[in-house]
Image (cartoon, helix red, strand yellow):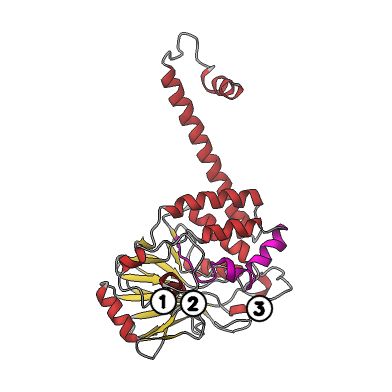
Amino acid sequence: MSCWLEIWNRHFKPYRPTDRPTDLSYLYSISFKKLRDGYMNKMTSDLDRQIEQLKRCEIIKESEVRALCAKAREILLEEGNVQRVDSPVTICGDIHGQFYDLKELFKVGGDCPQTNYLFMGDFVDRGFYSVETFLLLLALKVRYPDRITLIRGNHESRQITQVYGFYEECVRKYGSVTVWKYCTEIFDYLSLSALVDGKIFCVHGGLSPNINTLDQIRAIDRKQEVPHEGPMCDLMWSDPDDLPGWNNSPRGAGYLFGEDIVQKFNHDNNLEFICRAHQLVMEGYKYMFNETLVTVWSAPNYCYRCGNVAAILQLDENLKKDFVIFDAAPQESRGVPAKKPAPEYFL
């Protein structure tokens, strides 16, 4: 009762008795609209504040993470396993918690929402700032859902993050596993791939012997932990290789696939080429198979020691490709890193 009394006093009391509408449904509709608009304005204001805070590499409150993930879940539920993306768009590879290098990426590529972005997974692990990296990208997704697309990589996994840094970082920065649980639940809702203008297939890892068409990807139940095998696993773990056909992967998950596999998949699905991430490329990007597949890597000086440059792929409205190369952020612009590095594993 006190809530409605406050609404009346604030919005309707200024009316003289003879001016007050007598139709209660009208009063309710007006009051609901004011409440809704006020809520939306506050939510947008809070989100903008959180984005600015995260851009300073400052974590947000646990309660804010919970609310952010709840809103992100609503948005991601509406996206498909093969999410449609319109050009022009800037495509990015692995980030791996290298927050200050993500800021360099935005410097050379432009800020969101002015630039339309597609990130191909592996936002977390290895780097020192996986929490800030993932939460910033997620906040941008909630704030500008049509201007940033996030697809799932093999590191967006409960099992992998418990070994390679993200789990430990969440516990260290928040004092419990709660934020890790919020984030890993969101991992389950990320799209498995994206399709730019119906012509360019974007996926974190690669192809699967169990997938011949995009419709087969659309039929996967993605709302689960990354399986140890099968088509969903293959999309995140597989790699292209100079050998023809399908071969076992040294990673222990996914497959190696050759040029013949790519040519058939592209032909059968009317694709121009495949864009993927997942593998370190010292030059930032690498074409294979007569430019029918490209690997994009967006974490410069990977693990703070590899010495590689990074790249992003800019596609204009005609799908003309322009690779932008960038270096790691200067040391003086970085914060104090965590003391314990992530464990080694194959690239």
| Foreground pick, 300 / 154 | 154
Residue 113 location in percent, x, y?
46, 57
Three-letter residue code for mark 1: Gly
Most foreground residue, 239 or 159 = 159
Left/right placement of residue 39 relative to residue 86 reads right
Give the amino acid at mark 3.
Answer: Pro
As measured in the structure, the alpha-carbon distance from the residue carrying label 3 to the one carrying label 1 is: 25 Å
Q: Residue 51: within the magenta?
A: no
**Numbered disc in front, either 3 or 2:** 3
Question: Looking at the image, is mark 2 or mark 1 earlier in the sequence?
Answer: 1
Residues at circles 3 and 1 in contact by the CB criterion of under 8 Å: no
- Residue at 72% in and 69% down: 336
Question: At which x and y percent is residue 272?
Answer: 29, 75
Q: Are marks 2 and 1 in contact (CB under 8 Å)?
A: yes
Residue 35 seen from this side:
yes
Residue at image location 72% in from the left, 74% down from the top: 340
CA distance for labels 3 and 2: 18 Å
Q: Amino acid at mark 2?
A: His
Residue count near mark 3 (Cα–Cα under 10 Å), binned few <14, some 14–19, many ≥20: few
Q: Which mark is residue 278?
A: 2
Mark number displayed over residue 343:
3
- Give how far apart the Cα atoms at labels 2 and 1 are: 9 Å
Please indicate, yes or no, whether residue 97 appears anywhere in the rendered image: no
Question: Residue 41: x and y, percent?
Answer: 52, 40
The image quarter containing residue 308 is: bottom right
Q: Earlier in the sequence, mark 3 or mark 2?
A: 2
The residue segment tinted magenta is 149-175
Q: Quadrant of the C terminus?
A: bottom right
